[in-house]
Image (cartoon, grey):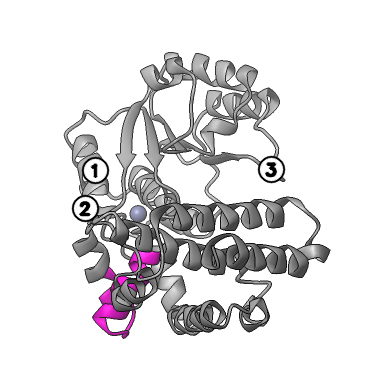
Amino acid sequence: MTALYAWLEPTYQQIRHAFTQGHGHHALLFKAEPSLGVEKLIEAVARFLICQQENSEKPCTHCHACHLINAGSHPDVHYLASTENKDIGVDQVREINEKINQHAQQNGNKIVIIDGTERLTEAAANALLKTLEEPRPNTYFLLKTDITAALLPTIYSRCQTWLINLPSEATAIQWLQQQHSAETNEICTALRINYGRPLAALATLEQGLIEKRREFLRQFWVYYIRRSPLELLPLFDKELIFQQLDWLSAFLNDALKDQLGIKSGWICQDLARGIQQFNQHQNPLGLLKANQILQKVRSDLSEINAVNQELILLDGLTKMITEVFEK
Ligand SMILES: [Zn+2]
């Protein structure tokens, strides 16, 4: 078993401790920030509960149960998730209920893992609730949901909730340093532009996006000085377009923070000098307007057929010039 992400380890240890002390809960609800790899934590808890090796801190990885779970074929581990972006229906829950009513095939624990608990239809949630209200011996539910998602209050009342928040910056940086050889300031930038999410930051580093962002914002500067959309338009990349808009938006937001004297929470700390230079000719209302234009571009791009991508971008870049920079 690979090591658990550093920011999930404390929660895993608390859960493990509770179970080894004999007061583990039969239904654990993981309410998590997105992109923190919580599925790994759930997998680790499932493995711990399914391993037949008593008293081990971690799953042993070599008993029969561990072998089966490694192969993804343990008959007493059941998964429920939304498929093809559809809600989880009552029939799917009934099917699981039937399975857990039978004896465990491996004489150990039975586990039900539900990914995207917020996708249960009301009927499905009620069917699940019945099962949660009458805990069966050796049967455990591991539920995952988004931190912002709303669930039926009755589901909460039957579960023990574990909140998985963003790790501290120090924890995230330390972990990233173990994964990637980039300089610390690049690691910090990667983390900030991904709003503190270490896995996304790692992807940014691995895809060389720090350098791409730098180039892109350098070209934004040329566009700004020359008042020419055609300086920036060719740099938009179909695969990166939303990230590129985020880079711009973060730059403008930090410029606004600078204008308002807000020193904390900057995303583009690496570009502080450039932002101050840019700001010599900006005012808060203009920066707000520029960001509104960007948000409109973003929503148009996500709604309208991609055929018009270039036109939407051109229109937005032109508006920023006429309605903000030349005003
Ligand atoms: Zn084992």
> Of the residues shown, which amino acid type is indicated by label 3?
Asn
Q: Which amino acid does label 1 sit on?
A: Arg
Asked if the residue under mark 3 is in contact with the one under mark 1, i.e. CB atoms within 8 Å, the reply is no
x, y percent for residue 105: 52, 38
Please state if 51 lies on the left or on the right of 155 as rendered.
left
Query: What's under tag 2, amino acid-wise?
Result: Glu
Assign a secondary structure to mark 3.
Answer: loop
Q: Which of marks 1 and 2 is nearer the N terminus?
A: 1
Q: In this view, does 115 lie above or below 167?
A: above
Q: Does the residue labelled 1 lie within 8 Å of ligand 1?
A: no
Q: In the image, which is nearer the foreground, mark 3 or mark 2?
A: 3
- In which quadrant of the rendered image does the N terminus lie? bottom left
Question: Of callouts 1 and 3, which one flags the residue occurring earlier in the amino acid sequence?
Answer: 1
Residue furthest front in the image: 327
Query: Which disc number belongs to residue 85?
Result: 3
Q: What element carries label 2?
A: loop
